[in-house]
Image (tube, rainbow, N blue to C red):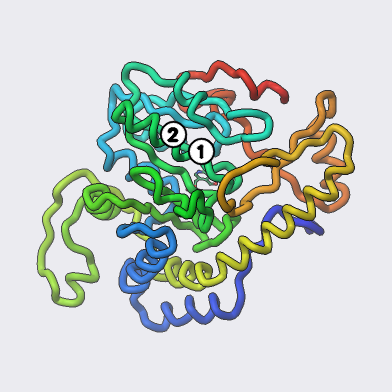
Amino acid sequence: MDWKVPLFDPDIDETEIASVTEVLRSKWLTMGARTSQFEQRFGAMVGVPHAVAMNSATAALHVALAALDIGAGDDVVVPSLTFVATANAVRYCGARPVFADIESYDCWNVGADSIESALTPTTKAIVVVHYAGYPCDMPRIIALARARGLAVVEDAAHAPGATLEGRAIGAWGDAGCFSFFSNKNMTTAEGGMLTTTRADVADRARKMRSHGMTTLTLDRHKGHAFDYDVVGLGYNYRMSELNAALGLAQLDRLADGNARRADRVARYRERLATIPGLSIPFAHFSGEPSYHLMPVLLPRGIERSDVMLRMKDAGVQTSIHYRPVDTFSRPSAGRRTRRRTCSRH
Ligand SMILES: Cc1ncc(COP(=O)(O)O)c(C=O)c1O
């Protein structure tokens, strides 16, 4: 379909094309120097000493939880209003997702109160999602987690470049997980990044990303190593040099892109305010969001699919972000949330 206004339109220019072409010409295609450079520059933006590039945010979430020793018998609190990958990552570890509700019709993030009411005697970690790039109430959530000895993972798929109290999103919890899927604020086609202040988490994540091996193909190619050991269960979650080259170029434009998004959101807010009954969440927020999505809440009694069809006819693409995970037919086999605030649709 030829949308007049598509949901997303990756901002790819000659710089990206030249960077990717250069990788192809270099003939070193798998994880290497560009990936390391991308990790260093992304980590510097987030203000953390460790960034580990992966081939998706889903992989980063899985590895973050596994590196934090989440496993069978553990409960992990996750928002019900998120993409299914957030909850699936918990299940990859053999743990059980326990769903928490949004804070209010204005704040679609999970809050400390909703997290608290989802805690069980076996809760070991909390995953928060900075929905649409609006920062969660991290000071309260971190305080709650620390008081109970729980780990915190930030699903920052929507939030590259977002900050709260001067600290980047992705630098608050034990790990932050970013997505570079092609509809995100910056893209590597497919890709993700784990950020952390913890050397132990970074070290385990680096090994898990590549089969639990102690050296890389590049180390052996350069003659820095002849052999490797396997020191734990690992996966192939590596990023390629092509993706990293794209990421480096995109990172340079992230701040500008986020500023343009802020400007568009302000204009949408102003114009949509004239439609009776329509509400736009996050009228109140803290910090500097990344404005990944532009969500609206329709008035009661208006059929959402009718609105979507009318907008489709006008060439404007819309999408549902998200059907709450615990309402799917197989809701990530987790424990359902007692829905206090989400029942409007
Ligand atoms: C909130 C959230 N978490 C995780 C993911 C998974 O990201 P990826 O596609 O990079 O695995 C997404 C992707 O849309 C997302 O929106």
Q: Which residue is mark 1?
A: 137
Q: Are marks 1 and 2 in contact (CB under 8 Å)?
A: yes
Horizontal and vertical percent position of residue 136? 52, 40
Please tell me whether residue 1 is drawn above or below residue 96 in the rendered image. Answer: below
- Label total for image: 2
On screen, 295 above or below 7? above
In percent of width and height, residue 73 lies at 29, 22
Q: Can residue 114 be seen in the rendering of this structure?
A: yes
Which residue does the image show at 18% across and 62% down from the upper left? 215
Q: Identify the image quadrant of the N terminus.
A: bottom right
Q: Is the CB of the residue bearing disc 2 within 8 angstroms of ligand 1? A: no
Q: Of 231 and 100, which appears nearest the observer? A: 100
Quadrant where the C terminus is found in the figure = top right
Q: Residue at x 41, y 83 (%)?
A: 25
Q: Residue furthest front?
A: 165
Mark linked to residue 299: none
Kind of residue at disc 1 = Asp
Residue 55 location, x and y as percent? 41, 56
Q: Is residue 211 visible?
A: no
In which quarter of the view is residue 14 placed? bottom right
The answer to whether 150 appears left or right of 188 in the picture is left
Instruction: Please provide percent x and percent y for residue 47.
Output: 39, 59
- How crowded is the residue under tag 2: few (<14 C-alpha within 10 Å), some, or many (20+)? many
Q: Amino acid at mark 2?
A: Ile
SS class, disc 1: loop
Kindly state the secondary structure of the residue where label 2 is placed.
helix
Q: CA distance from mark 1 to mark 2?
A: 6 Å
The label on residue 141 is 2
- Asked if the beta carbon under badge 1 is closer than 8 A to the nearest atom of ligand 1, the reply is no
